[in-house]
Image (cartoon, helix red, strand yellow):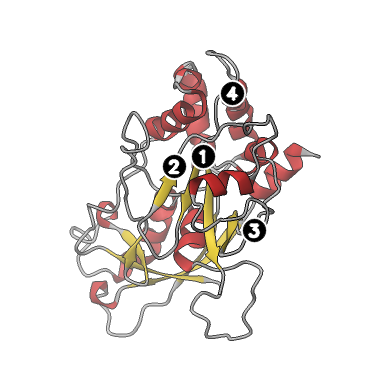
Amino acid sequence: MDTVALRRAVWNGSIPCRIELDPSESRVFDAVGPYFISLPRMSYIPLYMAEIYRFFTPFLIDTSVSCLENAWLEFETVPLKCLLSFAEFMPVRYDRHWPVGVLYDLFTGRDPTVTSADEEDEHSLPWKLVLRFQNFPIKHIMRIDSGNTFQGAAFARNGHAKAVLGLSKSESNKLWEALQFHNFDHFWNINEKILSETVAGPLRSFSVRVYVPSTPRVIQQPIPPYVDNNEPQTVGTALNSLLPELFPSKRTPVLSRPVIHGVVISMSTPLIELFPIAMYPDGFLHITLAMSG
């Protein structure tokens, strides 16, 4: 298995988007044309807001009010992202933006194996988003804090954040710049060090989040690499332990199917093989669910 090639393929995944300006924000009577952009699945919306904002600036009523700091995107009247507290799952509260790929898979609720011939399908690509400035949803959106983002994931993975805190200032800056400029090689040159860091012993658990569509429910719990009989933990055994009501079987998806990076993942996939390839830049394996029927 060529881990680097698979990581690069995942890294290069993107979501084509069609962004419209909310009519109430426009100073012109005619409809403003949409802005088309391809957002990397592994990245975060705030990193592209300046580019989006520049396109629509000439059409804004008052740029002192409709400023970049007040800009936000919504999908079907829902702000991206809905902010949740994970205080009940982790020793420290880490609130953050969700990666683009997670937002798309969760909010559209699409089953990647089902294709629609209907050109009016509301979830067909490009992803249709709306740019707004008024009534900034401060309870739902916050800016990325690079330090908290990576420290939170490191804690869940190793039980501590030493791997991240041990990075030099130069390495920390390069890691953040690699995200900003979507540079695969620069990111993984440093992230590999975080993954391999075992200051307090061997890997304790995988940092996994499972998102249940059409609900505010997000499940986060440490997942050990192996089950009781020392067999590798699989996607199926992990989901059965986290959501037995949706995954009564450890081998067969009955009520829903796990989706990672827009792909339905086999229930028999060992997490120890999947995690180093499919983890997001924040260090978590984000799993959304496609409900059957």
Residue located 41% across and 35% down the image: 149
Residues under labels 4 and 2: Cα distance? 17 Å
Which mark, by number, is residue 284? 1
Front residue of 215/141: it is: 215
Q: Residues within 10 Å of mark 3 (few under 14, many from 20)?
A: few
Instruction: Determine whether the residue tagged by mark 3 lies in a helix, strand or loop.
Output: strand
Q: Nearer the viewer, residue 237 or 37?
A: 237
How far apart are the two marked residues, 1 and 4, measured between alpha carbons? 14 Å
Q: Which residue is mark 2?
A: 220
State which quarter of the image contains the N terminus: top right
Identify the image quadrant of the C terminus.
Answer: bottom right
Pointer 3 with pointer 1, Cβ within 8 A: no
Tell me where residue 54 sits by quadrant: bottom left
**Which mark is drawn over residue 203?**
4
Crowding near pointer 1: few (<14 within 10 Å), some, many (20+)?
A: many
Q: Is residue 118 above or below residue 162?
A: below
Q: CA distance from mark 1 to mark 2?
A: 10 Å
User: Sequence-wise, which precedes: disc 1 or disc 2?
Assistant: 2
- Of mark 3 and mark 1, the one earlier in the sequence is 3
Q: Residue at x 65, y 49 (%)?
A: 10
Q: Amino acid at mark 3?
A: Val
Amino acid on which the number 2 mark rests in the picture: Gln
State the SS at label 4: loop
Between the C-alphas of marks 4 and 3, the distance is: 26 Å
Q: Is residue 55 above or below residue 191?
A: below
Q: Percent x, y for residue 53?
A: 36, 59
Residue mark closest to the camera, 2 vs 3: 2
Q: Amino acid at mark 1?
A: Phe
What is the C-alpha distance between the residues marked 3 and 1?
17 Å
> Helix, strand or loop at disc 1?
loop
The residue tagged 3 is 263
